[in-house]
Amino acid sequence: MIIPEVRQELLKIAHELEQNGHKPIGRRLRELEGELYRRRGVHPTKVRSQAITPDLKRQIRTFKAAWPDKSEQQIAAHFKVNMGRVSEALIGKRR
C-alpha cells in the first residue's frame, strides 16, 4: 500500500467506527490520517551570500588577477559570496 491508500483506508475505518458509536477512536484515526501528508520544506537559515552582479564579477576577476595564488575559497571569503559564485565569475558561465 502506498501512503495515499493508507490515508484513504484510515478514513474509511474512522467513518465506520464513528457510525458504530466509537467517535473518540474515529476522531483519533482522522487526526492520524492528517499526519500522513508531506510537510512543506522550509529554509532554516537566511541566505548569507550576496547576489552576483556585473560589478561584483568584475571585482572578483580583478582581485584574482592581482592575487593569482589566492584560492577560490579565499576569494569567496573575501567577497562574502559562495565559492560557486566565484567560479561562475571567473569562468563566465552564468549571466
Image (cartoon, helix red, strand yellow):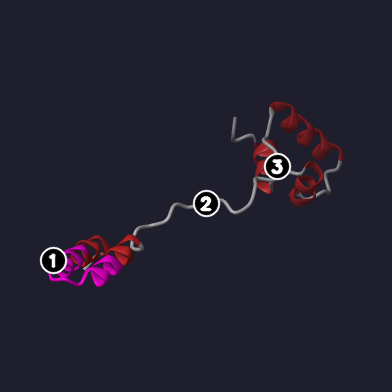
Q: Earlier in the sequence, mark 3 or mark 2?
A: 2
Query: Which secondary structure dominates the residues rendered in magenta?
Result: helix
Q: Which residue is mark 1?
A: 19
Amino acid type at mark 3: Val
The disc labelled 1 sits on which kind of residue? Gln
State the residue at coordinates (80%, 40%).
Answer: 64
Residue 34 place in picture, x, y as percent? 33, 60
> In the image shown, does 20 or 42 lie closer to the viewer?
20
Real-space CA distance between mark 2 and mark 1, rounded to the nearest whole angstrom: 39 Å
Q: Residues within 10 Å of mark 1 (few under 14, many from 20)?
A: few
* Residue 64, disc: none
Secondary element at image label 3: helix
Residue 63 percent coordinates (x, y)? 83, 37
Give the residue pinned by disc 3: 86
If you read the primary sequence from the N terminus, does the residue marked by circle 2 or circle 1 appear first?
1
Task: Please check the rendered image and state whether residue 47 is part of the magenta-colored stretch, yes or no.
Answer: no
* Residue 10, quarter of the rendered image: bottom left
Name the residue carrying label 2.
42
Question: Residue 16 in the image: x percent, y percent?
Answer: 14, 67
At mark 1, the secondary structure is: helix
